[in-house]
Amino acid sequence: MTTQKILPPSVSELRALFNGKVIAPDDPRYEQARTVFYGGVDKHPAAIVRVADAGDVSRLVSLAREYGFDLAVRSGGHSGAGHSTSEGGIVLDLSAMKNLVIDHEHQTAWVEAGMTAGEYTTAVGAHGFVTGFGDTGSVGLGGITLGGGVGYLTRKFGLTIDNLLAAEVVTADGQLLHVDEDSHADLFWAIRGGGGNFGVATRFKFKLHKLEKIYGGMLFLPATAETIASFLSEADSAPDELSAILNVMPAPPMPFLSTDVHGKMIIMAMMVYAGDVQVGERVMSKFRAIATPYADMLRPMTYPEMFPPEEGGYHPVAASTTMFLDHVNRSVAQFMLDTLSKSTAMMAVTQLRVLGGAMARVPADATAFAHRGSRIMANLAALYNNPEEKEHHEAWVSKYEKELRQSDQGAYVNFLGAVDQAQVRAAYPGSVWKRLVEIKKRYDPTNLFRLNQNIPPK
Ligand SMILES: Cc1cc2nc3c(=O)[nH]c(=O)nc-3n(C[C@H](O)[C@H](O)[C@H](O)COP(=O)(O)OP(=O)(O)OC[C@H]3O[C@@H](n4cnc5c(N)ncnc54)[C@H](O)[C@@H]3O)c2cc1C
């Protein structure tokens, strides 16, 4: 006999409870509201509660605890594992909570967790300020911050969490806590890398840095073993002001690339020099000299210009994984090129991020993100259309990862897809895991917050 799961209270009762909107399957907005960034995630929640304030968050968390339904927490909806939705459960959707208050005098900002990185960057950028997140504007502040935050300002100003001064968090008992170095310091440590395991962050307080202009943009170079290795070596020895994200991949048919380049292996580098633009130009000249660029779009600009408008309705299906590398010399680079060329995916990419700088100067035990000494982050991905090819592309990614693996066994939690417990533990090496479990037991003993890269309370 099957027992039908009845959601207590009913949708109409839920609607009466919240200041925000409750979107159920009968609502014309439901299809759009249940859609997350990644394609291939097709879940039907019983309702999506677009919370309006911390009171709504607390009420929904308390209901989930009382009735035991699955609670998915969503900020920007970019979870690679599809964690921010649920089949039959309720989605706590923060996307209507976007209040931002800038304190010019102290150079800080309080922002609600439903804002996207791009919205925040534009808003504070209008005042000449920056806080670093990742490389994509549509990512939500909630997910990227709680996992760590690696982007264009990492070597200059550290990870996103290194710029997090405080947060407000609704814990499993429904309480709204102010969390910082002095208040619930254990929780403050855990939410800086431990993801959504400990509660729902409703607001963050970030450091703001004055940065009127950068020298940055995109540089397209031919990808050979030589150019990839040289690029990484230059990026590693460059001043901290420079952060670079390289994508090694076959050239897409981009209008500014000549047609004879389309399909050839390229380095598509996204680069930021976060300092004096003249010095920035000199630093970039070393990268320009690696090979004759296919396209050179590096120039003085404002930081928000690094986040051009994104294509709405883009929902890629991806097989992907993440790892850290110690070095990429010519033979490693050649192996990458050979492996990429063997993929049958619509698009196969190896993304490389040179780490170090400010992020590496934070002690490894200062936050739950513990990979301070890691040198290079590598994301391996195969994008495809046909869901029947899933297994094939996943096997390619998994073999690639095994063969590429060097001594660093860690992983960055925010780039993990749907993984098993062992892979989640790779994000939290050694004593970090034990410490996180203890804090989880304290704040979420029943594992109410389990739709995430989960740290069970046992
Ligand atoms: C295109 C793309 C580009 C990316 N680029 C970068 C990058 O450059 N640098 C980088 O570091 N990462 C990057 N990421 C990874 C990204 O940081 C993670 O996927 C992150 O979890 C997304 O956050 P979100 O709020 O958009 O996602 P969501 O799917 O909304 O949330 C992801 C998970 O975070 C938790 N969560 C979200 N908000 C809250 C909250 N307020 N309180 C408690 N828990 C919460 C939940 O567990 C949820 O399941 C990228 C991802 C994509 C898809």
Image: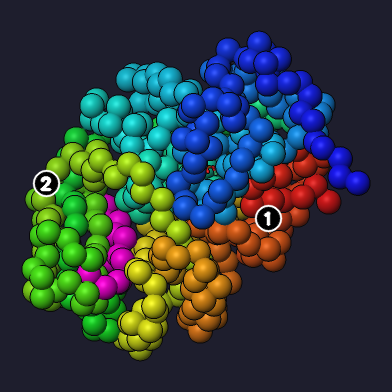
Query: Mark 2 and mark 1 in contact (Cβ < 8 Å)?
Result: no
Mark in front: 1 vs 2: 2
Image spot of residue 103 (x, y percent): 37, 19
Image spot of residue 212 (x, y percent): 19, 35
Residue 190 in sight in this render: no
Please name the residue that numbered disc 2 is placed on. 300
User: Which numbered circle lies on residue 432?
Assistant: 1
Within the image, what quadrant is residue 416 found in?
A: bottom right
Q: Toward the viewer: 377 or 158?
A: 377
In the image, residue 426 above or below residue 30: below
Image spot of residue 57 (x, y percent): 63, 23
Classify mark 2 as within 8 Å of ligand 1 or not, answering yes or no.
no
User: Which numbered circle lies on residue 139?
Assistant: none
Mark 2: secondary structure: strand
In magenta stretch: residue 220: no
Would residue 314 be found to the left or right of residue 402 on screen?
Answer: left
Would residue 128 be found to the left or right of residue 37 on screen?
Answer: left
Q: Residue at x 37, y 66 (%)?
A: 351
Residue type highlighted by circle 1:
Val
The first of marks 1 and 2 along the sequence is 2
Magenta extent: 235-251
In magenta stretch: residue 245: yes
Residue type highlighted by circle 2:
Pro
Q: So how many labels did they put on this image?
A: 2
The alpha-carbon separation of the residues under discs 1 and 2 comes to 41 Å
For disc 1, the neighbor class at 10 Å (few under 14, some 14 to 19, many from 20) is some
